Structures are given as C-alpha cells and as structure tokens.
Image (cartoon, rainbow, N blue to C red):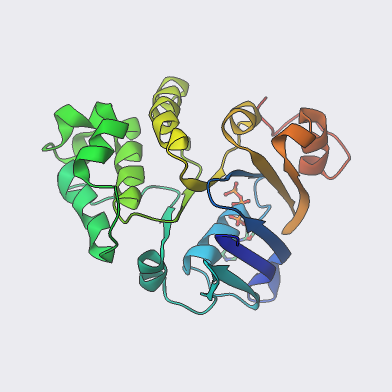
C-alpha cells in the first residue's frame, strides 16, 4: 500500500486553479523530487498535502486514511510533517527548544533529540544557543530536525536550499545524506536539477499546476525533465543545471 495517495487534486486561489488534477502515489522509503518553474504550483501542492491550503476537489490518503479535510495538526499526528519554505522557527528559543516542539504530536518512534543531533552534527555545539543567532544552514537543519521529532511516516521539504549560500546548501545536503540512508519517505522541492537527480529515486515535474512528468530517475534523463519543465519549448534560463 502507498504511504501517500493523491487523486485528482485541485487547489484554487479564488477562480485560479494553482493545482489541476494532480494524482500520484508514494511508496514507503521513496524519495520523490518535485520540480517545476516558479509558479508551477509546487508550494501550493505541498501546503495542500499538509492541510495549510484547502482542497477544492480530489483526495489525499495517508496510510489508507482519507486526510483531505483533516486540519494540519492532526495530519502531523497521523504521520505527515512539512518543513515549509522559510523554516518558521521561533528565533528567540534555543535550538533544543525548537526541536522539542516537534514532539508535541505525541508520535512514538526512533527520532529524539539525540538522534537528530547525530544526523545533524553541526547542531551539537549549538543546542543551547538561541536559534536567531544561528546561520541559515543551522536553522534549516533545525527545521528539518523539528519535523523529524514528530516521527513522521512522510517528510515533506519545501526548497531547503532557499536563501542559503552554495556552501551552506552543500552542508545541509551532506547532513541530509544521513537521513536519506535511514529509509525515510521524503518529498522534496529542489530547483537544482543535478541535486534532485542525485538524491531522489523519482521525479515529478509540474507545469502550470499539472503533472507534466512522473518517472523513476533511472527511466528518465536530464533532457526529458528539462523538456517537461518548459513544456517542450526549451529555453535556457530559469533552471539551474
Ligand atoms: P515557486 O518556485 O516560485 O515557489 P511554485 O511552483 O511553488 O513556485 P506556487 O507558489 O504554488 O508555485 O504558486 C502557484 C501559482 O499560484 C502561481 O501562479 C502563484 O502566483 C499563485 N499563488 C500562490 N499563492 C497564492 C495566493 N496566496 N493567492 C493567489 N495566488 C497565489
């Protein structure tokens, strides 16, 4: 059975259909990269999965349970955690305090503060420091760690690289590497196609709210993804190689 099953999902802002008839399934342990140009609907889709945007039509099932109308906090308790764009941490709390907030979902599992610190060793010395004084990379690791503390069945990461220098992005991905090896099911939005192709088993490319390409990484190519990204009329700008 799929961990997450999305069927004919429509999400609208007023009359505007930002997500149009999107369907896909994710199996346990799969790492899915969601790519697409600015405005393709990636963030809207992720927010709808997490319950932050209302669904206009279609359904979302998590472990076989229909969560389409479930409020966000109950989705976390049901096993779905989103690391949103912009991280949304409490900057005047310590890293450890921010991590502890992830526990409030009350889900049992292997993730606790020690395991998060093992996965993101750059946080070890900073665990009692105020989050607002941390670097962007340390804050991103904290945001991911906080989501893991809820022991999710599926972790959804929206543009972990956003606003970080290339060096810091490398550091975040280096620490994510440990997480990827644990077999956690992950959906991640990543603009850097090389990186997406390296970390993910599967890619979905969105174009104007629709799924343009859905393929195992081993069955596709950079050219095919780039074609899907631009809707066949290839242009050079916009997609970082
Ligand atoms: P980006 O990479 O720029 O974050 P995206 O693929 O995540 O892009 P979304 O942010 O989901 O795309 O936006 C999809 C479409 O919905 C865009 O046309 C955007 O302008 C529109 N949109 C997003 N948020 C809102 C909103 N709050 N109200 C109205 N329209 C919105």
Quarter of the image where ligand 1 sits: bottom right
> Relative to 199, does residue 4 appear above or below in the rendering?
below
Q: Residue at x 35, y 51 (%)?
A: 147
Q: In which quadrant will I find the N terminus? A: bottom right
Instruction: Residue lying at the far top in this picture: please name it.
Output: 167
> Relative to 210, does residue 78 appear above or below in the rendering?
below
Confirm whether residue 88 shows in the render: no
Confirm whether residue 123 shows in the render: yes
In percent of width and height, residue 74 lies at: 38, 73
Instruction: From the viewer's side, name the closer residue of 133 and 107.
Output: 107
Q: Quadrant of residue 13?
A: bottom right
Q: Quadrant of residue 170?
A: top left
> Relative to 165, does residue 210 appear above or below in the rendering?
below
In percent of width and height, residue 155 lies at: 45, 51
Instruction: From the viewer's side, name the closer residue of 211 and 168.
Output: 211
> Relative to 174, does residue 229 appear above or below in the rendering?
below
Residue 87 placement, left or right of 225:
left
Q: In which quadrant will I find the C terminus? A: top right
Q: Residue at x 60, y 28 (%)?
A: 198
Q: How many marks?
A: 0
In percent of width and height, residue 46 lies at: 54, 58
Q: Residue at x 16, y 44 (%)?
A: 96
Instruction: Residue lying at the far front in this picture: please name it.
Output: 1
Instruction: From the viewer's side, name the closer residue of 105 and 28.
Output: 28
Instruction: From the viewer's side, name the closer residue of 209 and 81.
Output: 81
Residue 17 placement, left or right of 80:
right
Q: Residue at x 59, y 53 (%)?
A: 27
In percent of width and height, residue 21 lies at: 74, 67
Instruction: Residue lying at the far left in this picture: please name it.
Output: 128
């Amino acid at each position: 059975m799929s961990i997450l099953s999305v069927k004919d999902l429509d999400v609208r802002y007023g009359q505007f259909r930002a997500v149009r008839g999107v369907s896909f399934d994710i199996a346990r342990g799969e790492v899915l990269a969601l790519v697409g140009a600015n405005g393709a609907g990636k963030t809207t889709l992720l927010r709808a999965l997490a319950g932050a945007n209302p669904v206009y039509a279609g359904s979302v099932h998590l472990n076989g349970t229909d969560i389409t109308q479930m409020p966000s906090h109950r989705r976390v308790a049901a096993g779905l955690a989103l690391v949103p764009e912009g991280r949304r941490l409490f900057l005047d709390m310590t890293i450890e305090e921010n991590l502890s907030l992830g526990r409030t979902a009350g889900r049992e599992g292997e993730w606790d503060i020690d395991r998060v610190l093992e996965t993101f060793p750059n946080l070890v010395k900073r665990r009692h420091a105020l989050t607002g004084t941390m670097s962007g990379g340390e804050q991103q690791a904290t945001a991911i760690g906080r989501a893991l503390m809820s022991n999710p069945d599926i972790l959804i990461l929206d543009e972990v690289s956003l606003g970080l220098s290339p060096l810091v992005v490398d550091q975040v991905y280096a620490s994510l590497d440990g997480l990827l090896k644990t077999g956690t099911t992950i959906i991640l939005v990543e603009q850097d196609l090389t990186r997406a192709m390296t970390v993910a088993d599967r890619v979905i490319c969105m174009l104007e709210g629709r799924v343009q390409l859905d393929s195992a990484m081993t069955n596709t190519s950079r050219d095919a993804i780039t074609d899907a990204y631009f809707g066949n009329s290839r242009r050079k700008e916009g997609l970082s190689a």
